[in-house]
Image: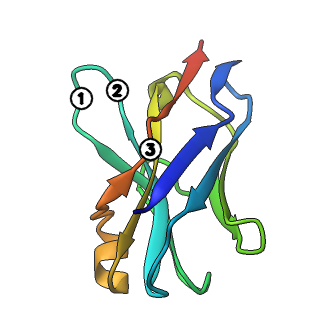
Amino acid sequence: QVQLVESGGGSVQAGGSLRLSCAASGYTYSNYCMGWFRQAPGKEREGVAAIYFDGGITYYGDSVKGRFTISQDNAKNTLYLQMNSLKPEDTAMYYCAALYGGSGRCGAFDFSYWGQGTQVTVSS
């Protein structure tokens, strides 16, 4: 069973930066994709970023392109999301997520597993 535990959320002023981390365990197969999605109160879930297992392909949601960077440390089984130039509209619960499958599902942020989430609040 895949287990994902997020950390690193918090409150920051607009223009600031945060780095989220996700400790992952329980992977059985090698063709996995990991990423992040977010959900704000009253809004639909939004795919933020994803990275295919070999690290060669990354995907970003349109609203975060150029500001957020996803990366992974396979030796530590840890996923990161570096968030720069944060905006109030980035305020949401951020979830670390994963799926087994091809790059198509990865690019569609079609995750099957996720953690408990970490809150990010950006004030103006």
Residues at badges 3 and 1 in contact (C-beta under 8 Å)? no
Of tags 3 and 2, which is closer to the observer?
3
Using a 10 Å C-alpha cutoff, classify the residue at mark 1 as few (fewer than 14 neighbours), some (14 to 19) or many (20 or more).
few
Q: Secondary structure at mark 1?
A: loop
Mark 2 = which residue?
40
Decide if residue 17 is on the left or right side of residue 123.
Answer: right
Q: Which mark is residue 30?
A: none
Query: Mark 2 is on which residue type?
Result: Ala
Mark 3 = which residue?
115
The Cα atoms of the two marked residues, 3 and 1, are separated by: 19 Å
The Cα atoms of the two marked residues, 1 and 2, are separated by: 5 Å
- 106 w.r.t. 30: above or below: above
Query: Mark 1 is on which residue type?
Result: Lys
- 52 w.r.t. 94: above or below: below
Q: Secondary structure at mark 3?
A: loop
- 89 w.r.t. 107: above or below: above
Farthest residue, direction top: 124
Mark 1 = which residue?
43
Residues at badges 1 and 2 in contact (C-beta under 8 Å)? yes
Using a 10 Å C-alpha cutoff, classify the residue at mark 2 as few (fewer than 14 neighbours), some (14 to 19) or many (20 or more).
some
The answer to which of marks 3 and 2 sits earlier in the sequence is 2
Residue 76, image quadrant: bottom right
Query: Mark 3 is on which residue type?
Result: Gly
Residues at badges 3 and 2 in contact (C-beta under 8 Å)? no
